[in-house]
Image: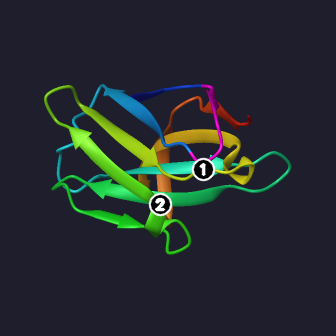
Amino acid sequence: VQLQESGPGLVKPSQTFSLTCTVSGGSITTSYYSWSWIRQPPGKGLEWMGVIAYDGSTYYSPSLKSRTVISRDTSKNQFSLQLRSVTPEDTAVYYCARGSSWSTDYWGQGTQVTVSS
């Protein structure tokens, strides 16, 4: 299984950005896998953001729930992250991964998102 993130590298404060994870070698609808977004701000640890399951159900980190939407396009075998009202504190390397908050196995290489005016 391979995952690849794509999206904008630079976002202005207060804007919304979206990232897409393209999955190959496995279907995002295969029971009972889940697909997560995880980020790592500079100098900090990993932060799990949310997950979309094989059946399309979603669950978000409580700290980000109000600003985050995870969706999917099964025809393209992709899932996406939308983060609203961003601030410089949202600057991070963003990863997509197979799994949930307690266990992941395959990860994308990560994509840098910088929030700056």
Number of other residues with Cα within 10 Å of mark 1, as a class: few under 14, some 14 to 19, many 20 or more? some
Q: Is residue 4 above or below residue 28?
A: above
Q: Residue 62: tell me if it is visible.
A: yes
- For the point 60% across and 32% down, the residue is 110
Q: Is residue 79 above or below residue 76?
A: below
Measure the alpha-carbon separation of dots 2 and 1. 8 Å
Looking at the image, do the residues carrying marks 2 and 1 touch, with CB atoms under 8 Å apart? yes
Q: Residue 100: tell me if it is visible.
A: no
What amino acid type should be assigned to the residue bearing mark 1? Val
In the structure shown, which secondary structural element does the residue marked by tag 1 occupy? Answer: loop
- The residue labelled by disc 2 is 67
Coloring scheme used: rainbow
Q: Position of residue 40 (x, y in %)?
A: 69, 48
Q: Position of residue 81 (x, y in %)?
A: 41, 44
* Front residue of 81 and 43: 81
Q: Position of residue 75 (x, y in %)?
A: 13, 28
Q: Which numbered circle lies on residue 86?
A: 1
* Front residue of 41 and 18: 18
Q: Position of residue 46 (x, y in %)?
A: 68, 55
Please name the predominant secondary structure of the magenta segment in the image: loop
Tell me the quarter of the picture where residue 77 sits: top left
The outermost residue toward the bottom is 62
* Front residue of 28 and 43: 43
- For the point 52% across and 32% down, the residue is 108
- For the point 29% across and 25% down, the residue is 25
User: If you read the primary sequence from the N terminus, does the residue marked by circle 2 or circle 1 appear first?
Assistant: 2
From which residue to which does the magenta span run? 9-14
In the structure shown, which secondary structural element does the residue marked by tag 2 occupy? Answer: helix
What amino acid type should be assigned to the residue bearing mark 2? Arg
